[in-house]
Image (cartoon, rainbow, N blue to C red):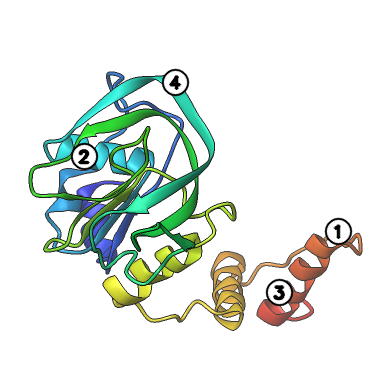
């Protein structure tokens, strides 16, 4: 996505997703620098955290051992992203989060204006944050069910930090699909092969709602 596309979209926040690439390789993907200049919250996930760290002055290195699977991270500093979110507590009352890791590279130095929010023995920067700019990075994957509080973190970022409204309901999804069908079909006719399965039945329902029996 280009800077122009981001400006046109005018997002309330930006999520930099994970991916199979390595930030240590030449020509690996980078976020447009405007992402960090747009004045909106940014949430980097796995590779997204790594490229955020590199682009803002931190350092990433390839690890000798790939980390894949369950991990428990300890929250060591307060952050809006995980405040009040926990799976357990340490003996001295620090929050613990059950998460799912899947990475080879790891951040070895965070940008100077970030703080460490959470860590593990093998991953010193499991969560990093710049609260003033509302930039957050997590080395694990909040989007998978194995990260037990992952959906709460994503909701915290989208609803509370980005101040987005929860408008994307099932009814909204249907309305959007119907509008796109009408735009694409126009005055043309559609032939649909209906098998009776879920996919074709849903397609038939959406087509009927969009263009009727034409």
| Viewer-nearest of discs 2 and 3 | 2
In the image shown, does 44 or 122 lie closer to the viewer? 122
Disc 2 to disc 1, C-alpha distance: 50 Å
State the mark number for residue 53: 2
Q: Secondary structure at mark 1?
A: loop
In the image shown, does 24 or 67 lie closer to the viewer? 67
Local crowd size for mark 3, using a 10 Å CA cut-off: few (<14), some (14–19), many (≥20): some
Question: Which mark sits nearer the N-terminus, 1 or 3?
Answer: 1
Disc 1 to disc 3, C-alpha distance: 14 Å
Q: Which residue is mark 4?
A: 65
Residue 162 seen in this snapshot: no
Picture residue at 19% right of the left edge, 62% below the top: 134
Q: Which residue is mark 3?
A: 206
Q: Secondary structure at mark 3?
A: helix
Disc 4 to disc 3, C-alpha distance: 48 Å
Q: Where does residue 14 sit, x and y in percent of width and height?
A: 30, 58
Q: Which residue is mark 1?
A: 193
Disc 1 to disc 4, C-alpha distance: 50 Å
Q: Where does residue 200 sit, x and y in percent of width and height?
A: 81, 62
């Amino acid at each position: 996505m280009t800077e122009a596309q981001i400006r046109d979209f005018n997002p309330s926040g930006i999520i930099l997703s994970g991916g199979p690439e390595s930030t240590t390789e030449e020509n690996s993907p980078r976020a447009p620098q405007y992402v960090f200049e747009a004045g909106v919250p940014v949430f980097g996930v796995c590779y997204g955290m790594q490229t955020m760290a590199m682009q803002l002055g931190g350092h990433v290195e390839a690890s000798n051992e790939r980390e894949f699977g369950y991990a428990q991270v300890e929250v060591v500093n307060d952050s809006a992203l995980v405040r009040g979110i926990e799976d357990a507590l340490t003996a001295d009352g620090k929050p613990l989060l059950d998460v799912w890791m899947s990475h080879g590279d790891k951040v070895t130095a965070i940008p100077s204006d970030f703080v460490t929010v959470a860590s593990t023995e093998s991953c010193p920067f499991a969560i990093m944050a710049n609260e003033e700019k509302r930039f957050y990075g997590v080395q694990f994957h909040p989007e998978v069910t194995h990260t037990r509080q992952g959906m709460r973190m994503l909701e915290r970022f989208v609803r509370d930090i980005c101040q987005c409204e929860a408008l994307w309901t099932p009814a909204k999804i249907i309305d959007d699909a119907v509008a796109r069908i009408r735009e694409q079909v126009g005055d043309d006719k559609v032939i649909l092969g209906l098998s009776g399965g879920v996919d074709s039945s849903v397609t038939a329902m959406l087509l009927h709602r969009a263009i009727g029996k034409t």
